[in-house]
Image: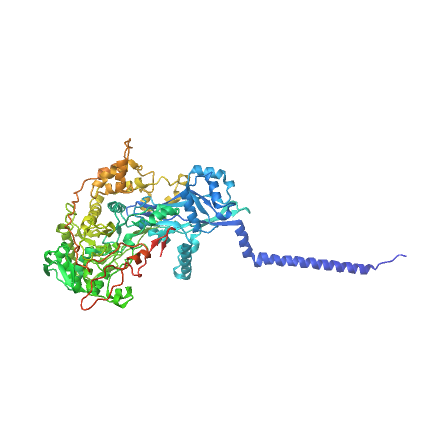
Amino acid sequence: MTEFQNAEQQLSKFRLRVAAAGLFVFVCFGLIGLRFLYLQVWHFSKYSLQADENRISVAPIVPNRGIITDRNGVVLAKNYSAYTLEITPSKINTTLDDEIDRIGTVIPVDARDRRRFKKLLEDSKNFESLPIRTRLTDEEVARFTAQRFRFPGVEVRARLFRQYPLGPTAAHVIGYIGRISQRDQERIDEASDQNDADTDHYDPRLDANNYKGTDYMGKIGVEQSYETELHGLTGFEEVEVTAGGRPVRTMSRTQATPGNNLVLSLDIGLQQVAEQAFAGKRGALVAIEPSTGDVLAFVSAPSFDPNSFVDGIDQQTWDSLNNSPDHPLLNRPLHGTYPPGSTYKPFMALAALTLHKRTPGWGFQDPGSYTFGGHTFRNDVRAGQGWVDMNRAIVVSNDTYFYMLAHDLGVNAMAGFMKPWGFGQITGIDINGEARGILPSTEWKKKAYRKPEQQRWYEGETISLGIGQGYNSFTILQLAHATATLANDGVVMKPHLVKEVENPISKAVRLTVRAPSDKISVKQADIDFVKRAMEGVVTNGTAVKIFRGAPYLSAGKTGTAQVYSLQGANYSGHATAEHLRDHALYIAFAPAEHPTIAIALIVENGGWGAESAGPIARRVLDYYLVDRLKPGAEAAAVAAAASATEGATAPVIGGSQSAVDAALPASVAAASPAFNPAAASAPVAASNAAAASPAVAGSSASSASALAASSASSAEAGSAASAAAPAAPVAPPSPAAMMLRALATPHAPILPVATEARETPRAGGNASNGQKETAPVSNAKEARKASPAPVPAPKPPKEPAPTAAIPRNNGKNLIQTLTPSGGIDE
């Protein structure tokens, strides 16, 4: 029997199924559509950005760091490009030591490279790329590239390097760059946050993103203090890449803006003459142009080679510098504080005239000593120096006169007068870490000590302040600044090391100091009187033998500062340990009528100021006022500096430095042989430099001879090399050397100074006169060692002598020491 199905019912079911399926499909397509809208419309920006980030790689373009030159265009810091071999520790498959051993089979890796790499590894993160070898030759690059597949996580990179062509010359001024440490990064981030908060004065150079891709920054000197100017603005490049990270094409590029160039106020010829004059000695010298505040020379002896710090200094080299008893890393003009000795007397005389405590004609018959409170303060000449008025007191450096003057003025009046001249004050020079020193006053002592009996000021402590001893403790920079202000008739110009900042693109120049900072209220007649007395020091006083025969008239003052208390004994320099001998000081300005240079210098443990410091001042002034002005002298100085120091170890990728050339200062781009090796004279051979050294040393103040001698490490090293050199054919001298010899004309000799030309008390029986002043300390531990025992309260009615030792900083001043990473540890 055939069963018939209901067609309408079947059709209805079919239609229902089709409708359900259609609804399902519709819902699915709706969900897909909604998802499409969600991805492509509502979150388009988000996912488009992610896609672009996967497709486009944004790489920072590190800007060229600004060039640093001296006032005459001699390049002191420049850039060059070279290849480095770098390891990313997180990407290697073996241990670091094994990987370095394997690399050593392809490219030489010496012990110094290993020590430097391990030091960098300690200060860096595991995922950062660190150089194991720098300055690879083309042959080494080709050899490693051929076997690169064997070394995952190791690659060759092209980088810009910093070079200091003149090496140790002016190293404490220029400073150096080093790798950015964690502490540096924190400072960058903090400065960036402050910059973001100040929307009205936002500076893109201070943004943390401006250091993307940058591995190095300034650590000390102008490299640090002008970091913002030198660094420039980082550029960015957008590159389309494959899924494997291989670049396909460059989509856009924002060029980096090179850093500004710095033109220092230094005269590098004068700097080298001064540094050579300090050969074998410890000390400091600052020379300033009085009318502008330009620092013409800034010497800290001994110095160091800043090139050692650029790639990261190894521990062995660091230890040799840091543990040296001569402290070459200490910036003596900036950080070192010393008693000024008799160089303080001209300012004491000016204080007496201004405060109406003395007239120029007031005088007395010198008894050879001054007694106060039962203590005798002795003059150098025991029998006295006859009739002494203010002029003669300065000329012959009479102590008795200034003992009496100090008592009449009082400590607070002296402090009030000396403060505007910059003593015990921050000068504001444009490098970091300046020490304040000590300008004693009753208020200072209350802050410096805790115990009431120590906080009390005793009249006996005032007496030795008059001759620049006692608690007086100033930097050589402060002493030079005060001397320059005196030479400038009381007009204060802020001392500065950077004269101009130049835009490398527009070549626009911006002066750093434009106008005077202040004008000290003193009578011109009083200043003129003190100046004439300082001229007398040179013409018939304690410095007469030093400047005999000089073709110019200068004004100066010798000074000697005691390092330890004599405690009643007689002083004998030759019988005293070298580190306990007196410091020798000298201040001067010249020409006397219209000064163009003012100097202050110290020779640590040098003995009498007229014997050790005076001849250095003569050489410096001779060069600046005489030799520098000879026809061709400046060109010879530039050529000598370039040929003596132009490094052969500065390879250039592709044989070109076009990116760096574009950033050259306008005054240097066409003419500076210190930057363009092809334009410079051939380097002077070591044998030539050694043979020339004895002849160079014979000239008292020849600019050319001093610069030639600077091509060796020192005059002494050159003489030793000359004596030890075997007889062999000598290469012909370079053009620079021939120019130097032609310019090396003899000067009137500097006669030896007899020991009777003294200016500070050396006799015994003067407990309060012999203030103990230790050499400048380089860290807080040494400062604590140098601090004296507490001063016991005196028994009335007698006043005690000043303390036998003076605390160098009393915990109030910042003492900074350099750290192996190249920074300053506060």
Question: Left or right: where does residue 435 sit relative to residue 768?
Answer: right
Question: Left or right: where does residue 266 sit relative to residue 569?
Answer: right
Residue 161 in which image quadrant:
top left
Q: Residue furthest top?
A: 729
Image x and y of residue 6, in percent? 83, 60
Q: Nearer the viewer, residue 767 or 590?
A: 767
Indicate how the structure is coloured in the image: rainbow
Residue 353 appears in the figure: no
Who's the residue at 25% across and 63% down the image?
791
Who's the residue at 40% across and 39% down the image?
655
Q: Nearer the viewer, residue 107 or 623?
A: 107
Residue 392 in which image quadrant:
bottom left
Q: How many marks?
A: 0
Image x and y of residue 473, in percent? 25, 58
Image x and y of residue 692, in percent? 25, 37
Q: Nearer the viewer, residue 522 or 93?
A: 93
Quarter in which the N terminus is drawn: bottom right
Residue 349 appears in the figure: yes
Quarter in which the C terminus is drawn: bottom left
Image x and y of residue 427, in percent? 27, 57
Question: Left or right: where does residue 694 sit relative to residue 826?
Answer: left
Residue 561 in which image quadrant:
bottom left
